[in-house]
């Protein structure tokens, strides 16, 4: 449903389908029109909004009592996710780690006790920011975390220590039910030094950070993405043993990004 639809057509659609049990809505509408429809359809279980930035209109906290799967920007997630039975959360746009809304956003994600699958996009300005631990969660099973290194706020060299810093020691223990973790580190300059990266050193370090006693975890990906491709370090458990391999991806970053459908299905 596109953003160019006049307001009176929204009213017509709303009235025609008011008694219908609409469960799935994918919309490009602005916030006022979107939430007008949302309040018409309390039966919604899946809501997807493609708009990156807008402030959500006022919507009662109990307007979407059955909403389980949500794809939206930072402000919308913070507005309508708290208190709901959210199982799938896909983040549109980015949340900036040095701005005030980061901790609010992280606390909303942590507070979704029913959450099982999430995709989150963050932008950081320092190698020392522990993003993963900020989203610690007792129930999360599939977590896809994209971290963009802001090239306007510093220079970043692709080194084993930078790659492994995306997965801090002890962080996986904060996700006791996690099954699959994908972390994407993204920076345009990674392509310049990719040939000098010691893959073996990264693989060894990744193995050392995975707790042997984690009952559910079976796959950890750390991807280093740049404009023309990506390097994937994948740790996977087979027959009770962990194995790590490096895979080179060619093509745009979109080839490794997790789509809403992937998150909803619980895999990548």
Image: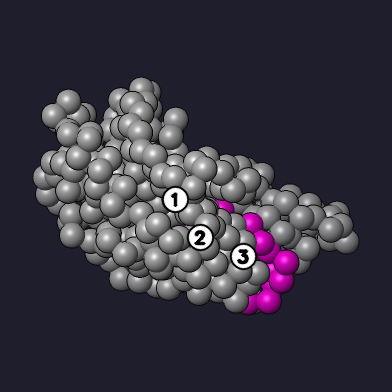
Question: Looking at the picture, does residue 114 appear above or below residue 249?
Answer: below
Report x, y in % for residue 203: 27, 40
| Res. 47 in view | yes
Within the image, what quadrant is residue 135 found in?
bottom left
Residue at image location 39% in from the left, 39% down from the top: 243
Rendering coords of residue 107 (x, y %): 43, 73
Give the position of the N terminus as an image quadrant.
Answer: top right
Tell me the SS state at disc 2.
Answer: loop
Q: Residue at x 55, y 67 (%)?
A: 139
Q: Do tag 1 and tag 3 residues touch (Cβ < 8 Å)?
A: no
Residue where numbered disc 1 is placed? 181
Horizontal arrangement in the rendering, residue 17 relative to residue 93 (left or right): right
For marks 2 and 3, give the CA distance. Answer: 24 Å
Question: Residue at left 48%, top 54%?
Answer: 217
Front-lying residue, 94 or 243: 243
Which residue in the structure is indicated by mark 2? 215
Inter-mark Cα distance, 2 to 1: 14 Å
Mark 3 — residue? Answer: 86
Circle 2/circle 1 CB separation < 8 Å: no
Label 1: state its secondary structure.
strand
Magenta highlight range: 61-75
* Viewer-nearest residue: 132 or 85: 132
């Amino acid at each position: 449903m596109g953003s160019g639809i006049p307001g009176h057509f929204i009213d017509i659609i709303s009235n025609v389908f008011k008694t219908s049990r609409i469960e799935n809505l994918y919309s490009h509408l602005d916030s006022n029109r979107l939430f007008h429809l949302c309040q018409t359809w309390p039966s919604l279980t899946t809501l997807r909004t493609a708009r990156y930035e807008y402030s959500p209109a006022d919507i009662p906290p109990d307007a979407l009592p059955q909403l389980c799967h949500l794809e939206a920007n930072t402000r919308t997630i913070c507005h309508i996710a708290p208190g709901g039975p959210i199982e799938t959360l896909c983040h549109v746009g980015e949340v900036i780690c040095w701005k005030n809304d980061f901790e609010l956003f992280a606390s909303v994600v942590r507070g979704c006790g029913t959450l099982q699958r999430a995709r989150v996009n963050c932008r950081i300005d320092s190698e020392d920011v522990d993003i993963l631990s900020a989203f610690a969660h007792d129930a999360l099973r599939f977590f896809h975390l994209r971290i963009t290194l802001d090239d306007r706020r510093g220079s970043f060299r692709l080194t084993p220590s930078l790659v492994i810093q995306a997965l801090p020691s002890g962080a996986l223990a904060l996700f006791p039910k996690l099954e699959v973790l994908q972390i994407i580190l993204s920076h345009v300059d990674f392509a310049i030094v990719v040939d000098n990266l010691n893959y073996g050193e990264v693989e060894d370090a990744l193995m050392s950070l995975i707790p042997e006693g984690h009952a559910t975890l079976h796959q950890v990906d750390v991807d280093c993405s740049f404009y023309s491709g990506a390097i994937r370090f994948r740790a996977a458990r087979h027959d009770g043993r962990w194995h790590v391999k490096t895979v080179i991806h060619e093509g745009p970053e979109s080839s490794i990004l997790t789509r809403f459908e992937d998150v909803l299905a619980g895999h990548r």
